Amino acid sequence: VGMVGPRVLNPDRSKQNSCREFPNLWNKFCTVAGLSRLFRSSAWFSGEEMHWFDHRQERAVDALVGCFIMTRLKAVEEFGLLDANFFMYGEDVDWGRRCRDAKWKVMFFPGAESIHYRAASSGNDPVRFATEALRAEFQLWRKHRTSVEVALLWCLMLIHYTFRLSRALLIATLQRRWNPTLRIEYTARAACLRALFLGSPRR
C-alpha cells in the first residue's frame, strides 16, 4: 500500500464520498447527462465520485480526495510529491494516478474517520472556485489523456454549462426573481462558459 485514506464525514457525521475513479469520457458523460444521479446505486452509470460505494468496506480505489491522505515514504520517493503545478483541485487524483502507475496500491480504510468541513474555503468565492475547478480538470486531462479526449471533454463541458445556465435562467423567469443561490449558480456557470472559450487565468 502506497496511499491510504479514511472514511470522511460531514460535521453532522453523515458520509462524504472520499473515493474517486479516474476520469474518463464515459463517467464524465454520466455526470453531465445526470445518469450518475438517476442511478446512484449503479457502478456502471456512476460518475467519478463512486456514489454506489457505501464506504463501509476496505478496498483498493483509483484515487482519494485530498482532504486526508496518508502515504508511505518509500512509495512517495518513487512517484513523487503532489504536483505543484496544480493550484487547487485535481492534484489528489493526479497523485493517485501516479501512485498506481508506480505499482503501489491506493486503499480506502473505513476503520479510521476524519471530519471535513466541505466548502469552508470555496464558499467564500464560489464563482472563482468553480472556474478553478474547471481549469484543474482540463489540466488533469491534458496530463493524462490524449488531445482527442481533451477535445471531447471540452464539448461535454460546453453542453453541461450551457444546460445549467439555461436552467437557471428558466427558473428565474418562472419565479420572476433571482434568489441568492440561483444567482450564484448562474454567475458561476456563466464564468465557466467564458473560461471554456477564453481560458481561466489565475488571479
Image (spheres, rainbow, N blue to C red):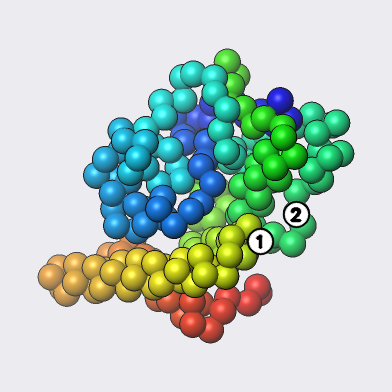
State left or right for residue 118 relative to residue 46: right
What percent of the width, then of the height, locates residue 116? 55, 36
SS at mark 2 in the image: loop
- The quarter of the picture where residue 29 lies is bottom left
Task: Give me the C-alpha separation between circle 1 and circle 2.
Answer: 11 Å
| Residue at far bottom of view | 198
Q: Give residue 157's mark.
A: none
Q: Which residue is mark 1?
A: 143
What percent of the width, then of the height, locates residue 159? 34, 70
Residue depicted at 62% across the width and 65% down the height = 142
Residue depicted at 17% across the width and 74% down the height = 173
* Residue nearest the observer in this picture, 103 or 85: 103
**Disc nearer the start of the sequence (1/2):** 2
Q: Which residue is mark 2?
A: 83
What percent of the width, then of the height, locates residue 146? 58, 65
State left or right for residue 92 relative to residue 197: right
Amino acid type of the residue tagged 2 in the rendering? Asp
Amino acid type of the residue tagged 1 in the rendering? Lys
- Quadrant of the snapshot with the N terminus: top right
* Disc 1 + disc 2, Cβ < 8 Å: yes
